[in-house]
Amino acid sequence: MQDKLPQLPHTNSQMSQITKSALLAIGLLLPVSQSAFAQGPGTSFEGQTLFSPISGTNTYLVSNDGDVMHTWPGNGRSVYLLEDGTLIRTLGDNLGTDVEFVAWDGTVTWAYNASDATHVFHHDVELLPNGNVLMIVREVFTTAEAHAAGRNPAHQLGGSFRPDTIIEVQPTGPNSGTVVWEWRMWDHLIQDFDPAMANYGVVADHPGRLDINFPDVNLDLGNWNHCNAIAYNPALDQIILNSRHQSEFWVIDHSTTTAEAAGHTGGAHGRGGDFIYRWGNPQAYRAGTAADQTLFGQHNTQWIEPGLPGAGNILVFNNGLNRPQGVYSSLDEIVPPLNALGGYSHTTGTAYGPLAALWSYVAPVPTDFYAAFISGIQRLPNGNTLACNGPAGKFFEVTNSMQVVWEYTNPFPDPGNKFVFRARRYRHCFEPQNFCSLSPNSTGPGASMDWSGSVSASANNLVIKVSGAAASIPGLFFFGDDQVQLPFGDGSLCVGGNSRRLPVVFSDPAGSASYALDLSNPALPSSLIGAADTWNFQFWFRDNAFAGTGFNFSDGLQVTFCN
């Protein structure tokens, strides 16, 4: 999921103090006293941070100054924001709904329940490019079934055994969906505890499978893996599944069919649903000792997205639970041993590389930064890394040289109850702004510019519009890099500087017209437009019925394009 905001009003960092005071007075901007501040000589990445307090009643989007820019009613665990303003959130247990899509105005547009008598949804989702949704569910087996699969009954607590499963759901209606692909941990087990039971073999010879007796501890309610994060890499068609209880993450081939995913052959890498890569704890597959363990109860493992510093590397919030070197957390970036075929270099019997992280952040006094559970991490476009210390409700941004340049402490619902599962920063895409005055015409008081789509240059879907122009006449939109206000024809020329005109269009009988910009076609003037550019648009049109010069203008529309 790309971290770009939908079009939003300018945040308070662009507001004057007078504007901020006025908004505070009328209740449109919520103050969060002393909750956010910049520090250190580095630069914070300007954006808005999305989070949902676990014990709260709302989901929040806050500016870098800590002002609440938008809220959605209802809370969640994992929360993500799409370019069209849709919020994706996962809900708590036993609420009847597991995953929701929520419009900008708070309307729930899709609600799906993945849980039933033998499956329990939990933690996280990942939206795929085709619109389907990957979900993590626990599959419920009896202790007798677990023993038959090779689990040592001496390490079984409670009446069930619950390994994790991935389902891919295609939304089909407001409250429905179809499972179109599935991967089950249950299909990829190995054990050397009991030769009379299923899955018996040499654990070290099968690094693509998981030892059903690791770790060899009692399980609370059969919660074996406790996978808390899922991520997808569209270029590789691979999935990361992060396991807190095994203290490692696994990479799975998504190119398989469901039938192939249940076996050990097939797919792009010929290994079916077996792991094609794993990292964090080689004890789990008998390729190392406790001294070789690098992850400790970690969360939010993910690939760094294309176009960002470190793209293709893997980020992990390493909680540090029971870390032998001390009780502290770290932010870790690793370089997976990816080969030219999209697989991972590895010699059976040895630990998967690398031996250590490429980059890690640890607090100057390590124990000052410790989150025993929940929490998250994100690489930002300027190379900084955003961290969410979930139990403390504290977010901070750190540079590659370990300087903390921004901090925020969640005040919701109250200072003593501020747990946050994770937080995510979204870059600004500012809402286009009208400028210049209207000029009366034969239809009425004046033609006004408008827009639809988004100002994201990569989305390339901005439509510029005009209403209130003369009816059923030819006209054209044009754009330039300067703003002026000069009398011209029967109105005002509002756009100047380096100007370009777009193709002629005709207004409809109501005096409205539109033009869909295409930023990708080099034959069109709009191909000049790129991310971070600001251009001013206006509409010129014939208006012989006005008994003036015979032509007029709309007001202007300033558009700043984001990535």
Image (tube, rainbow, N blue to C red):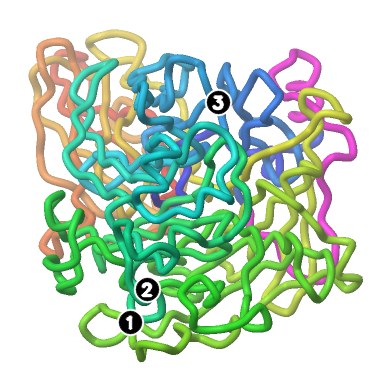
**Residue ID at (51%, 39%):** 123
For the residues bearing labels 3 and 1, Cβ distance under 8 angstroms: no
Q: Which label belongs to residue 92?
A: 3
For the residues bearing labels 1 and 2, Cβ distance under 8 angstroms: yes
Say which of 266 and 525 sits in front: 266
* Magenta-highlighted residues: 19-46
Point out residue 488 in the picture as x, y percentages from the top left corner. 33, 35
**Residue ID at (16%, 11%):** 510
Q: CA distance from mark 3 to mark 1?
A: 36 Å
Marked residue nearer the N-terminal end (1 or 2): 2
> As shown in the figure, which amino acid type bears the numbered disc 3?
Gly
Q: CA distance from mark 1 to mark 2?
A: 6 Å
- Horizontally, residue 23 falls left or right of residue 121, namely right
**Residue ID at (51%, 86%):** 354
Q: Which label belongs to residue 344?
A: 1
Say which of 264 and 386 sits in front: 264
- Horizontally, residue 470 falls left or right of residue 410, namely left
**Magenta-drawn stretch, dominant element (helix, strand or loop):** loop
Q: Quadrant of residue 330?
A: bottom right
**Local crowd size for mark 2, using a 10 Å CA cut-off: few (<14), some (14–19), many (≥20):** many
| Disc 2: which residue | 277
